[in-house]
Image (cartoon, grey):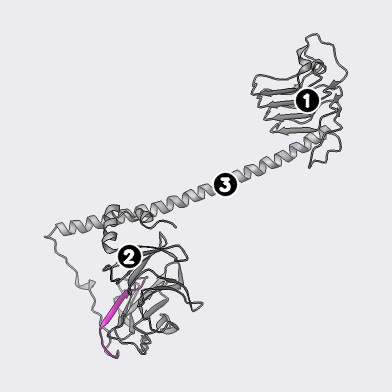
């Protein structure tokens, strides 16, 4: 019979096959060394009972030379051998059983496999017990794999929601910008419209006469809460005008009532050449200011100086708080650098170099994490430099003509700033 020469038997994707051998056929394949059965949906038994075709009953089932056995992806497989007679596998050394969830035993009879090795399983020579242990381990692995897949799916969903939220914010900002442009266009086209302001909407405020030196207001700044205005005089003195939170409360007053003023240190500064600059923290607690001299940090609740630093030269020309951390201050300098200063540590964390002349202004983008700055450079009337990432160590320089051209090409699309200033 031709079966006696078979050494390797590989059965895959035979979905209608219910078993492989009747018991009497096992003695007819004495040379079988390797048996693989993969992905057979209806397979329930490898060695079945007497099939009723007239073969004589056997006293034992034996695979005398079988060395390797692989059973994979057999959802209906209950056991390898359904006979109650002894099953002998004298040379079997490696057995792989994977994704056979219905398998509860290897054979109904005694199993002899003296050379079988199952690393990591304490089975004490009982193959049926080993099958149960293997099934428990595989169920644990499958459960762990399922949890990992579920966690990965949740992570992807969270990242997707974050991306959708960022996209929604950018789309809303773009729509708002487009609406502002359309509104400005309509206002410009309608020449017949007159701008009418009721008398209750206007309020006259003047710097108090008691301020020493020139009375000229150099900088005006709204507080972030919207209930106050900061005025910086060209002599370095500041006043805070505040009013009640209720719209019916029209009373306002200069703070503090005691007359104590927040005044910058202008020692050695030439006020006529100084560039007054001022900025307020996000929570309206602190204000930084300078007027040709040292940079001062004031507590607006107590109207006192909490820190002074960086005496000139060079003098500061522009100031701003970092939006995400009020302890970080961006300071534009007369020597064309921008210094990132940590108020807590009282030291400069980074120095940005890219401009050729003094810094004339800059602004943070809270969405794109950019610091866009401009300087009075000799080559261009205004060079715009974008600094990217938390270390503030990369920039892209554009002249005012190039910047205007790119804004036109990008059609004022806020999302296109990612293209204009790529992620390094």
Residue 33's tag is: 1
The local crowd at label 2, few if under 14, some if 14 to 19, many if 20 or more residues have their Cα within 10 Å, is many
- Crowding around mark 1 (Cα neighbors within 10 Å: few <14, some 14 to 19, many 20+) is some
User: Residue at the location (78% across, 25% down)?
Assistant: 33
- Residue toward you, 300 or 127: 127
Q: Quadrant of residue 67?
A: top right
Q: Is residue 394 above or below residue 265?
A: above
Does the magenta run of residues contain 206?
A: no
Residue with the mark numbered 2 = 384
Q: In the figure, residue 362 lies in which quadrant?
A: bottom left
**Which stretch appears magenta?**
212-223
Disc on the earlier residue, 2 or 1 = 1
Q: Is residue 51 above or below residue 92?
A: above
Considering the numbered disc 3 on the image, is that residue within a helix, a strand or a loop? helix
Between the residue at mark 2 and the residue at mark 1, the CA separation in whole angstroms equals 76 Å
- The C terminus is located in which quarter? bottom left
Residue reaching furthest to the top: 54
Q: Position of residue 150 (x, y in %)?
A: 59, 44
In the figure, 70 relative to 236: above or below? above
The structure residue drawn at horizontal position 68% and vertical position 23%, both measured from the top left corner, is 11
**Residue receiving disc 3:** 152
Residue 407 horizontal/vertical position (percent): 29, 57
Question: Which residue sits at x=67%, y=42%?
Answer: 143
How far apart are labels 1 and 3 at the CA level? Answer: 42 Å
* Picture quarter with the N terminus: top right
Q: Quadrant of residue 8?
A: top right
Q: Is residue 218 magenta?
A: yes
Image coords of residue 122 (percent x, y)? 83, 41
Farthest residue in the front direction? 379
Mark positioned earlier in the residue sequence (1 or 3): 1
State how far apart marks 2 and 3 are (Cα). 42 Å
């Amino acid at each position: 019979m031709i079966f006696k020469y078979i050494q390797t038997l590989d059965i895959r994707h035979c979905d209608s096959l219910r078993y492989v051998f009747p018991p009497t056929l096992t003695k007819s394949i004495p040379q079988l060394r390797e048996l693989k059965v993969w992905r057979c949906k209806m397979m329930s038994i490898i060695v079945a009972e007497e099939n009723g075709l007239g073969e004589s009953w056997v006293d034992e089932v034996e695979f005398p030379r079988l060395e390797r056995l692989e059973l994979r992806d057999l959802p209906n497989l209950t056991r390898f051998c359904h006979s109650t007679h002894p099953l002998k596998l004298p040379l079997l050394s490696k057995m792989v059983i994977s994704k056979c969830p219905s398998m509860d035993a290897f054979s109904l009879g005694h199993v002899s496999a003296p050379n079988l090795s199952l690393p990591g399983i304490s089975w004490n020579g009982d193959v049926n017990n080993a099958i149960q242990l293997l099934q428990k381990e595989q169920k644990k692995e499958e459960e762990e794999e399922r949890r990992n897949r579920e966690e990965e799916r949740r992570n992807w969903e969270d990242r997707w929601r974050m991306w959708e939220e960022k996209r929604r914010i950018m789309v809303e900002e773009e729509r708002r910008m487009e609406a502002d442009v359309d509104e400005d266009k309509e206002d410009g086209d309608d020449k017949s419209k007159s701008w009418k302001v009721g008398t209750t909407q206007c309020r006259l405020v003047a710097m108090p006469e008691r301020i020493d030196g020139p009375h000229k207001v150099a900088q005006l700044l709204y507080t972030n809460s919207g209930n106050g205005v900061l005025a910086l005089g060209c002599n370095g003195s500041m006043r805070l005008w505040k009013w009640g939170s209720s719209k019916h409360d029209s009373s306002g007053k200069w703070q503090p009532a005691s007359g104590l003023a927040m005044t910058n240190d202008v020692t050695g500064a030439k006020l006529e050449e100084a560039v007054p600059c001022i900025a307020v923290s996000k929570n309206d607690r602190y204000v930084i200011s300078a007027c040709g001299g040292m940079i001062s940090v004031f507590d607006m609740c107590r109207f006192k100086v909490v820190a002074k630093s960086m005496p000139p030269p060079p003098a500061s020309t522009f100031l701003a708080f970092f939006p995400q951390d009020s302890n970080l201050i961006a300071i534009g300098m007369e020597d064309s650098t921008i210094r990132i200063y940590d108020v807590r540590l009282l030291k400069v964390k980074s120095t940005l170099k890219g401009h050729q002349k003094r810094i004339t202004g800059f602004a943070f983008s809270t969405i794109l994490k950019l610091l866009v700055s401009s300087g009075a450079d000799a080559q261009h009337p205004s060079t715009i430099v974008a600094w990217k990432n938390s270390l503030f160590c990369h920039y892209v320089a554009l002249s005012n003509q190039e910047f205007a051209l790119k804004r036109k090409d990008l059609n004022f699309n806020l999302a296109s700033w990612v293209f204009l200033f790529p992620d390094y």
